[in-house]
Image (cartoon, rainbow, N blue to C red):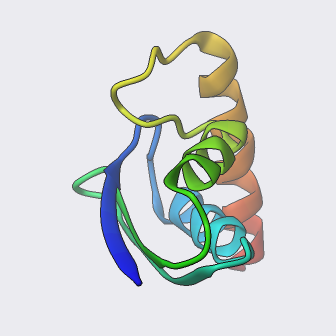
Amino acid sequence: MKTEEIIIANLKCNGCASTIKKEIAALSGVKEVAVDVEKDAVKVTYENIGRESIINKLYSLGYPEATEKNGLLLQIKSYGSCMVGRINNL
């Protein structure tokens, strides 16, 4: 089992965090997910899944690893994920 902290872009609020937790936790092999909004960080405990799969899922949600180019399309995706997370927390 491996635990890793991934610094991401576009993390704005607890709605974003909720979406990230739900979507990353749904990946096969992910055991635990924690999101720290203040640090722009996602802490993931996993096994039998590659780091690249987690990074790709974050990217598809609009939250790329902070070392990646953060374009307008990804910012729009992150706002959509943020809204979904906020609605799910109502």
* Quadrant in which residue 45 is drawn: bottom left
The residue drawn where x is 67% and y is 49% is 57
The number of callouts visible is: 0
Q: Name the residue at the front extreme.
A: 48
Image location of residue 89, percent across then percent down: 68, 78
Q: Nearer the viewer, residue 41 or 2?
A: 2
* Quadrant in which residue 44 is drawn: bottom left
Work out which quarter of the rendered image holds the C terminus and state it: bottom right
The residue drawn where x is 56% and y is 46% is 52
The residue drawn where x is 75% and y is 42% is 80
**Relative to 4, residue 9 above or below:** above
Q: Nearer the viewer, residue 52 or 20?
A: 52
Image location of residue 23, percent across then percent down: 71, 66
Work out which quarter of the rendered image holds the N terminus and state it: bottom left
Q: Nearer the viewer, residue 20 or 30?
A: 30
Image location of residue 58, percent across then percent down: 60, 47
**Relative to 29, residue 6 above or below:** above
Image location of residue 25, percent across then percent down: 64, 77
